[in-house]
Image (cartoon, grey):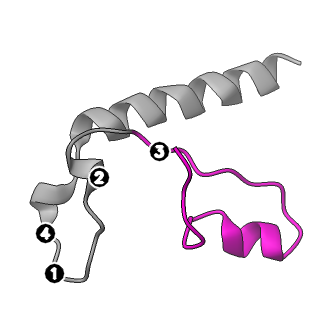
Amino acid sequence: MVIGAAADHFPFTYEGFNAVTLSTVSKKSRVVHTYKDGIDQLELEGFDGVGRLVLGVIEKIVEK
């Protein structure tokens, strides 16, 4: 899935940092978010999955 120019990592890469955006795909993620969004737009399962992935990557880096 291609993420648009508003991806979270763009400001960091613009400043010269290596960065990525992690995203989940689901029914809720197919909606373009606006300032009117509420807490119901968040997906705890997605946060959990991305959090586990990030922790796994950090653990692999620390092992080296």
Residue bearing mark 3: 23
Q: Residues within 10 Å of mark 1 (few under 14, many from 20)?
A: few
Cβ atoms at labels 2 and 3 below 8 Å apart: no
Three-letter code for the amino acid on which mark 2 is drawn: Arg
The relative height of residue 16 versus residue 54 in the rendered view (above or below) is below
Residue bearing mark 1: 36
Q: Residue at x 30, y 50 (%)?
A: 29
Res 30 label: 2
Q: Residue at x 33, y 37 (%)?
A: 46
Find the distance from the CA under tag 2 to the CA under tag 4: 15 Å
Q: Residues within 10 Å of mark 4 (few under 14, many from 20)?
A: few
Cβ atoms at labels 1 and 3 below 8 Å apart: no
Find the distance from the CA under tag 1 to the CA under tag 3: 21 Å
Find the distance from the CA under tag 3 to the CA under tag 4: 19 Å
SS at mark 4? loop
Q: Which of the two discs, 2 and 4, labels the residue nearer the N terminus?
A: 2
Q: Could you tell me residue 34's position as x and y percent?
A: 26, 78
Q: Which of the two discs, 1 and 3, labels the residue nearer the N terminus?
A: 3
SS at mark 2? helix
Q: Could you tell me residue 40's position as x and y percent?
A: 10, 57
